[in-house]
């Protein structure tokens, strides 16, 4: 799951990026408000983690612009303890959640998972498709109750496809979400991951929509 981190503090940004990466997020990090808006206009993210005090354009202004432009990306704001008025304002401006510095990285990751889950209209923390269950917090997958061992990328890819069940996801969207900036992506890397998923989970689950992308049908009821 690809996250945009907007934080000008180098130490804090480093820590958050490392912590979220350890929880399985692909993190792109920008350090000012203008760069954040440029990134959000150009790419799709599962969520953004937004500091308020930023150079060039502050976090509240980024948030206001984003919502004014109709961008619904889930936003989690990082606030300082004494910024009560800012917390209220950021929620009013369209933030979905906030954490107060200093915060725990595991809590931040859990809140992000919850935001993305709610954005996808789900209350259940696990993704289910027939006999297949994916638990985003534990990063585990079971098929008919038996654990399935997936690589990090395979897991992220499966999560995106299950999250979007019933919709075709294009190659571009999948690749954008799967890889952070600057990561080398082999031209057939996506196909290789899909191939491995089919081998581990059966060839029926993930369908190829030729020339467009991939699809998991809506979960059987
Ligand atoms: Ca700051």
Image (cartoon, rainbow, N blue to C red):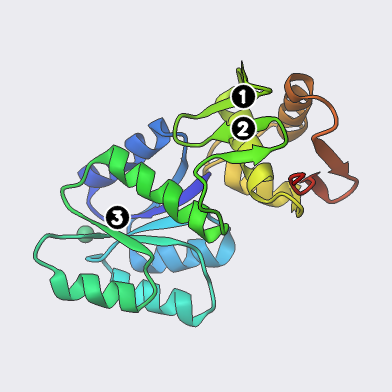
Instruction: Give coordinates of residue 183: x percent, y percent.
Output: 55, 36
Quote the CA–CA distance across marks 2 and 1.
5 Å
Q: Taking the image as drawn, is residue 57 in sight?
A: no
User: Could you classify mark 2 by the number of other residues whose Cα lies within 10 Å: few (under 14), some (14-19), or many (20 or more)?
Assistant: many
Pointer 1: what residue? 142
Instruction: Give coordinates of residue 93: x percent, y percent.
Output: 35, 78
State which mark lies toward you, 3 or 2: 2
Q: Which of 29 and 198 is in front in this view?
A: 198
The residue most toward the front is 221
Could you tell me which residue is drawn at 39 percent across and 79 percent down?
64
Instruction: Give coordinates of residue 60: x percent, y percent.
Output: 30, 74
Question: Which callout, 3 or 2, points at the residue further toward the start of the chain?
Answer: 3
Residue 172 in the image: above or below residue 150: below
Q: Point out the quarter of the image occupied by ligand 1.
A: bottom left
Could you tell me which residue is drawn at 59 percent across and 22 percent down?
151
Could you tell me which residue is drawn at 40 percent across and 62 percent down?
75
Q: Which quarter of the figure has residue 158?
A: top right
Pointer 2: what residue? 133
Instruction: Please say if the residues under marks 2 and 1 sit with CB atoms less than 8 Å apart.
Output: yes
Q: Which of 203 and 125 is in front in this view?
A: 125
Instruction: Give coordinates of residue 152: x percent, y percent.
Output: 55, 27
Q: Taking the image as drawn, is residue 53 in sight?
A: yes
Pointer 3: what residue? 7
Q: Which quarter of the figure has residue 184?
A: top right
User: Could you classify mark 3 by the number of other residues whose Cα lies within 10 Å: few (under 14), some (14-19), or many (20 or more)?
Assistant: many
The image's mark for residue 68 is none
Helix, strand or loop status at disc 1: strand
């Amino acid at each position: 799951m690809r996250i945009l981190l907007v934080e000008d503090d180098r130490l804090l940004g480093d820590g958050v990026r490392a912590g979220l990466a350890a929880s399985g997020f692909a993190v792109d990090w920008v350090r000012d408000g203008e760069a954040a808006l440029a990134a959000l206009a150009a790419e799709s993210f599962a969520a953004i983690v937004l500091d308020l005090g930023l150079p060039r354009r502050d976090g509240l202004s980024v948030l206001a612009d984003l919502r004014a432009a109709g961008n619904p990306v889930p936003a989690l704001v990082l606030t300082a303890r004494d910024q009560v008025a800012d917390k209220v304002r950021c929620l009013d401006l369209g933030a979905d959640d906030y954490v107060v510095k200093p915060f725990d990285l595991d809590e931040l990751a859990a809140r992000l998972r919850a935001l993305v889950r709610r954005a996808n209209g789900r209350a259940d923390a696990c993704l289910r498709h027939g006999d297949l269950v994916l638990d985003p917090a534990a990063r585990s997958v079971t098929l008919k109750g038996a654990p399935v061992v997936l690589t990090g990328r395979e897991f992220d890819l499966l999560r995106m496809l299950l999250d979007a069940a019933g919709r075709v996801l294009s190659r571009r969207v999948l690749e954008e979400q799967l890889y952070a900036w600057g990561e080398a992506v082999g031209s057939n890397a996506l196909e290789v991951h899909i191939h491995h998923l089919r081998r581990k989970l059966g060839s029926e689950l993930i369908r190829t929509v030729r020339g467009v992308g991939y699809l998991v049908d809506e979960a059987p009821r």
